[in-house]
Amino acid sequence: MTSKKTGAVPRHIAVIMDGNGRWAKRRLLPRLAGHKQGVESLRRCARACVERGVQVLTVFAFSSENWNRPQEEVSGLMSLLATALAKEVSQLSRDGVRLYFVGDRSSLSEKVRHGLAQAEQQTAHNTRLILNICFNYGGRWDIAQAAEKLAAQGVAITPESLDKAMALAHVPDPDLLIRTGGEMRISNFLLWQAAYSEMYFSASLWPDFDEAELDLAIGAFNGRERRFGQTSEQIQQPSTPTVTA
Ligand code: FPP
């Protein structure tokens, strides 16, 4: 997507799903109840993306820093992941969703790692939507692991080689990055890949983020001019190709 105000649907949407805890607190429920409702909201959002022709949805489910939350919440999120996999993967697969889990798997339990690999395998043939679930992911981790990989291979570190070694090398960069929950920061999410993403901040808590909210975000995206470092004039009147002898 390089043109101005195309009215087209973003090819890749990334989401920081914030606000589960507050959603639960307002209902005097434990925080985990908010995360459970967050899974419902994720299912709804994935289906809405399929219906709208979005090709890639990337969500932040557990950050490298989330290990610092109370032990009860961390283990709750781990078991929620296991339950969600058991419950949701078949339906996601029927909807044409291909799952990828993105992040550092080395500190996850053998059982969780097995579940992730199985879900990826089970959905590998699907082509309607790629759903990247970032779990134990951090933007700094991603850049560091890519650099480490290149160094180990003796490959020069350039923007292009790093790009190919990043954890999201299988998809184009996000066109639109949505954060729910009212905060306006990137919180170590796709630091490299969001270089030219359009940002959209929603005050809605993630469990309340529905199809109408998604359409508002897509509408806002469509009103933006994406310049990728060029001037507005260049975008509106693409230069004629240089003729070389
Ligand atoms: C941020 O809300 C949300 C998370 C840290 C977890 C996101 C997880 C889900 C939406 C469920 C999907 C997860 C799996 C396992 C597939 P917060 O807890 O920081 O909310 P708060 O800012 O209101 O406290």
Image: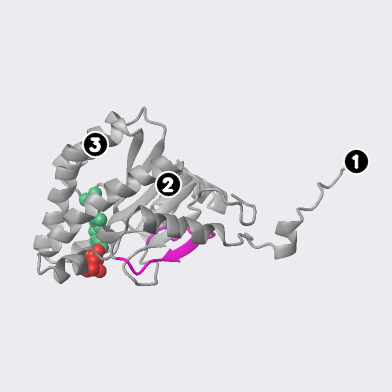
Q: Amino acid at mark 1?
A: Ala
Q: Nearer the viewer, mark 3 or mark 1?
A: 3
Relative horizontal placement of residue 85, taking residue 121 as reference (left or right): left
Q: Amino acid at mark 3?
A: Val
| Numbered marks: total | 3
Residue lying at the far top of the rendered structure? 125
Residue 245 tag number: 1
Q: Position of residue 146 (x, y in %)?
A: 43, 50
Quick one: SS at disc 1?
A: loop
Q: How is the image coloured?
A: one colour
Work out whether 152 lies above or below 220.
above
Q: Residues within 10 Å of mark 3 (few under 14, many from 20)?
A: some
Which segment did they paint magenta?
189-204
Relative horizontal placement of residue 163, taking residue 203 as reference (left or right): right
Q: Quadrant of residue 126?
A: top left
Q: How far, Cα to Cα, is label 3 from label 1?
A: 56 Å
